[in-house]
Image (cartoon, rainbow, N blue to C red):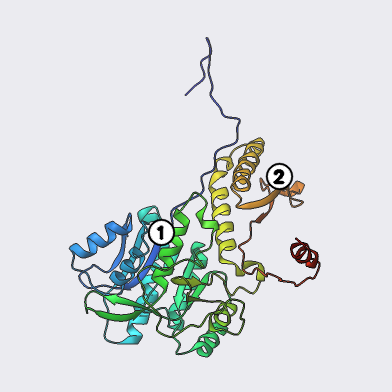
Amino acid sequence: MAVANYGVNVTIAAEAARPIKVESLTPIGIVGDALNLDEGVHFFVNTTEALSKLSEESVDGSVLRAVEAINDQAVETPIILSVFEKASDDNENITKVINATEEFKFAKSKFGYRPNLLIAPEYSGEDAVKSELEKMATKLKATAIVDLDANDVSEAKQKMSEFGTKRVIAAWPHVKIWDKKTKDYVFAPQSARIAGMIAAVDGAWEYGFSDSYSNRVMLGISGTQYPIDFEPGEGACSADLLRSAGISTIINEQGFRTWGGETTDGDTIWQDLARVRTFDRISEAGQKGVFFAIDKRASTLYHAKRSIEEMLRAFVGANVLLGFELSWSARNTLANITAGKFYLDIRMQNDPIVKQLTLDFIYVDSYGSVLMDKLNK
């Protein structure tokens, strides 16, 4: 609008920190085969809608079983399916899984959502599929959950030597479930159930993504394909050996519970999945929250910095972060300033997840006088 030459002109502007919203939804991307469902990518606003549509279309296949497993965890979360028609040749199916996984890069432009968790139950035991899921998870800043194909603890640990990333969680063994179709017990991969549990934990409160899915009851299962012994305080038990190798497993301790949450990243700082996902969510929110400053005058950066600061204060108040520090970087050289490039350093520490608690019980004789006092009464 042109400014009038006469009379009173009015402008409206904002000089304040912008509220930054942290994403609380956890869309799950599922790759798999389906009968009676068109090949390609499908979006459902929540688990109930997905099951309803799949039931309406009389769908069968790995994607249906995955959605049912997610639904067993009593969670409503966006579901994105990348579907293909199953072939009789195993190698052809691997190629189809890889191609279907690639389709997730278009999910945001199509549906406004991109997967935060990626799974391919019944296929992710293949090395090529695992590699493709890892690549896509890295591209999308997501987490892939894969199922190890192994016959015992030693073999499972050996397969983990191929892992080395903060973007993949590996699970073993399969879990025992009741199959309504065959009316019998079968063994199914964990990945879909873990994805459902992570989404449920994320949605439990505003900052649920900072919590771990480990040591929580996995719903809908009645055992494991291979026995996993667990003895509290015993480092030689199967559960501890698997978890030490970065493998998420199941223990029978007041219910069948998940036991894991570690990645295999080469940097030990990023071997905690909860920390990885916390930094992912905070950085993504910050990236979106200060987008208003791009292509504006540099003085707007004052409000961009304040916006980030207020967001981090909320995280400290919620005990997600222990503390933080903001400062303009030494990279803000005169040349970079002239080019319109600015750098803000944000140092922060999350409230760590407790992995080990040691109770030291020590005998002392200093209370013998208490006994003597009682005896003298």
- The quadrant where residue 246 appears: bottom right
Q: Which residue position holds label 2?
A: 338
**Residue 138 location (% of width, % of height):** 52, 67
Q: Secondary structure at mark 1?
A: loop
Give amino acid for label 1. Answer: Pro
Pointer 2 with pointer 1, Cβ within 8 A:
no
Can residue 51 be seen here? The reply is: yes
| Mark 2 Cα-neighbour bin, 10 Å: few <14, some 14–19, many ≥20 | few
Instruction: Name the foreground residue: 73 vs 98.
Output: 73
Q: Residue furthest top?
A: 7
Note whether 166 is above or below 299 in the view shown. Answer: below
Task: From this view, report whether residue 26 is shown above or below residue 237.
Answer: above
| Residue 27: mark in rendering | 1
Left or right of residue 217: residue 93: left
Secondary structure under tag 2 reads helix
Q: Of residues 231 and 21, which is closer to you in this image?
A: 231
Q: Which one is nearer the viewer's eye here, 374 or 8?
A: 374
Amino acid type assigned to the residue bearing label 2 in the image: Thr
Front disc: 2 or 1? 1
Label whose residue precedes the other's in the sequence (2 or 1): 1
Q: Is residue 195 left or right of residue 138?
A: left
From the viewer's perspective, is 26 left or right of 35? Answer: right
Q: Residue at x 54, y 85 (%)?
A: 157
Residue 45, numbered circle: none
Where residue 85 sits: x, y (%)? 26, 75
Give above or below for 357 relative to 87.
Answer: above
Quarter of the picture containing the C terminus is bottom right
